[in-house]
Amino acid sequence: MFTGLFIQDKSGSVSLTRYTQTPIQGKAPEKILQKGYALVCEGGGTRGFYSAGVFDAFIDAGILFPYIIGVSAGAANALSYVSGQKGRNRQLVEKYVANPKYVSKRNLFFHRSLFGMDFVFHEVPQKHVFFDWDLFSKQEIEFLTGALDCETGQTVWFNKSDITPGFDVVIASCSIPLLSRIVKFRSYKLLDGGISSPVPIEKSISDGNTFHVIVLTRNQGYQKTVFKHEKILKLFYRKYPKVIDVVMKRHEVYNSQIAMCLQLEKEGRALIIRPEKPLKVNDSADRNIQNLLELYDEGYDEAKAKIDIILKARL
């Protein structure tokens, strides 16, 4: 059964847009935290629904960070946090993640992308799960999304104003090497920002933030290992040697950034929120609804328990 939402366009005309899920209107935050606070978001594919639970706890607490930086699924799930739509990401899990059009080997075979980018970022927000563009646009915060520049091997950072209804910037940030197409945006050729900046803590520091809430999607003690398919990588990206270099060094960058996060937390300059229970969702393309909802609920509960620590942080 369809539910509708009246949408007013820039010309002032009003039309009824129908969605298959009950639309969730965005809720403005009670408080935007003071400058110096940063929210740093790791990716992780469907593991990122842990972060979605974390963000919904922040919405319930009425707080919005003045600076949010994320890559891949971290950036994608943070969209609904910025738009103030508690439960929107949960709707995605309940109704759409199990759909082969969301993520499947079939997508990879027919569309050269494990995740169905057109389905996830175009069909779903336009027909199934309403995204509150109006509130998203009004939020006066910094929201940075990172993607890998295939020609330079560097991370390109895009601002909130670069995110439009096509979601091109976010799609680029979620485009996993070998499992997704290169995304052409403006003069760039882009892939997953989680390859070059898996936990973008250094960018947050360089932008002047002094207390970092870091949302990770792996258990404590996880260490990334070297990529084992270098020959395939060289075959696919022979025109982009920088991509090969970045992927082959990703484990070093990831482990180094995690070590930096741990040191910052030890110094009282950061708070890490990550799954405390052993992960059932180890695969970044896991479609098990029950496991994903449990992970979402865990993220919500663990973030809720740390709200007071965040609010009392010394900047």
Image (tube, rainbow, N blue to C red):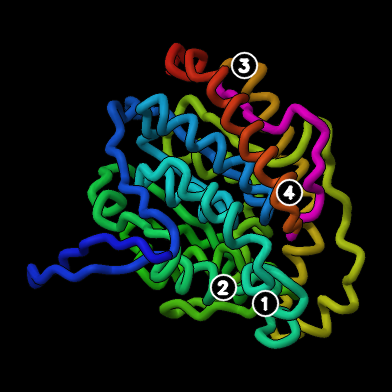
Of 291 and 208, nearer the camera is 291
User: Taking the image as drawn, is residue 260 in sight?
Assistant: yes
Q: CA distance from mark 1 to mark 3?
A: 41 Å
Circle 2 crowding by C-alpha within 10 Å: few under 14, some 14–19, many from 20: many
Q: Which mark is residue 117?
A: 2
Q: Would you say the magenta stretch is mainly helix, strand or loop?
A: loop
Q: Residue furthest left?
A: 12
User: Taking the image as drawn, is residue 177 in sight?
Assistant: no
Does 315 appear above or below 64?
A: above
Position of residue 34 in the picture relative to residue 100 (left or right)? left
Q: Please, what secondary structure does the residue beneath circle 3 have? A: loop
What residue is shown with label 3?
267
Residue 272 in percent (x, y) is at 63, 27
Q: Residue furthest front?
A: 1
Mark nearer the viewer, 1 or 3: 1
Q: Quadrant of residue 36?
A: top left
Q: CA distance from mark 1 to mark 2?
A: 8 Å
Q: Mark 3: which amino acid?
A: Glu
What residue is shown with label 4?
253
Q: Mark 4: which amino acid?
A: Val
Of 176 and 254, nearer the camera is 176
Which quadrant of the figure contains the N terminus?
bottom left
Residue 29 in percent (x, y) is at 30, 33
Q: CA distance from mark 2 to mark 3?
A: 40 Å
Q: Please, what secondary structure does the residue beneath circle 1 have? A: loop
Q: Mark 1: which amino acid?
A: Ser
Residue 65 in percent (x, y) is at 39, 34
Q: Mark 2: which amino acid?
A: Met
**Residue at image point 52% right, 44% down:** 203
